[in-house]
Image (tube, rainbow, N blue to C red):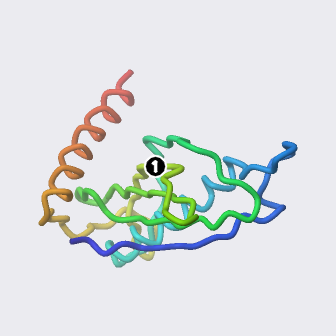
Amino acid sequence: MTKKTTSVQIVLAQHCNGNRKPRLFGGQLMAWIDVVGAVAARRFAKAEVTTVCVDNLTFLKPAYLNDILVQEAWVTWSGNTSLEVRIDTYVEHETRELVNRAYAVYVALDADEKPTKVPEFIPETQEEMDEYAMAVERKVIRMQMQQN
């Protein structure tokens, strides 16, 4: 199974919006998603990466001031120079509650900041095979959207 990259954050006042009950600002969560996703991508590619897109960013539940957020990121697919990473964000209470799921695409870069080949992702578990198949579908949709 692909190794997961994990990040832990505490939602502090500077991460929140101005609501009466301070909620995590979506833009802050997006920044944390990009960081943990890029780390997972860099570890897999063994190269620097740049973000190409975030395909799907779904806010399922809010996170509030002082919540502990746990993020897990792992590669779901790789092509020639690009790879997709799934990033799940949980609020940790007595149990973990999924608050966000995102899929991000990164391109590996060489020393001259040109796209460089990444290792082949070979799914091993049924979960990885399912994620891989869905990643291929998302890639087709992205390509169709670029043509329009």
Residue 77 percent coordinates (x, y): 25, 56
Residue lying farthest to the front in this orientation:
94
How packed is label 1: few (under 14 Cα within 10 Å), some, or many (20 or more)?
A: many
Residue 69 percent coordinates (x, y): 59, 65
Residue lying farthest to the top in this orientation:
148
- Quarter occupied by the C terminus: top left
User: Relative to residue 4, is residue 118 drawn left or right?
Assistant: left
User: Relative to residue 116, is residue 131 drawn left or right?
Assistant: left
Q: Amino acid at mark 1?
A: Ala
Q: Secondary structure at mark 1?
A: strand
Residue receiving disc 1: 102
| Foreground pick, 118 / 134 | 134
| Foreground pick, 1 / 111 | 1
User: Relative to residue 20, is residue 44 drawn left or right?
Assistant: left
| Foreground pick, 79 / 16 | 16
- Residue at x-position 47% and y-position 46%: 54
Residue 56 percent coordinates (x, y): 44, 41
Q: Is residue 134 above or below residue 145?
A: below
- Residue at x-position 67% and y-position 47%: 26
| Foreground pick, 135 / 97 | 97
Q: How many marks?
A: 1
Residue 16 percent coordinates (x, y): 79, 54
- Quarter of the figure with residue 47: bottom left
- Residue at x-position 26% and y-position 46%: 135
- Quarter occupied by the N terminus: bottom left
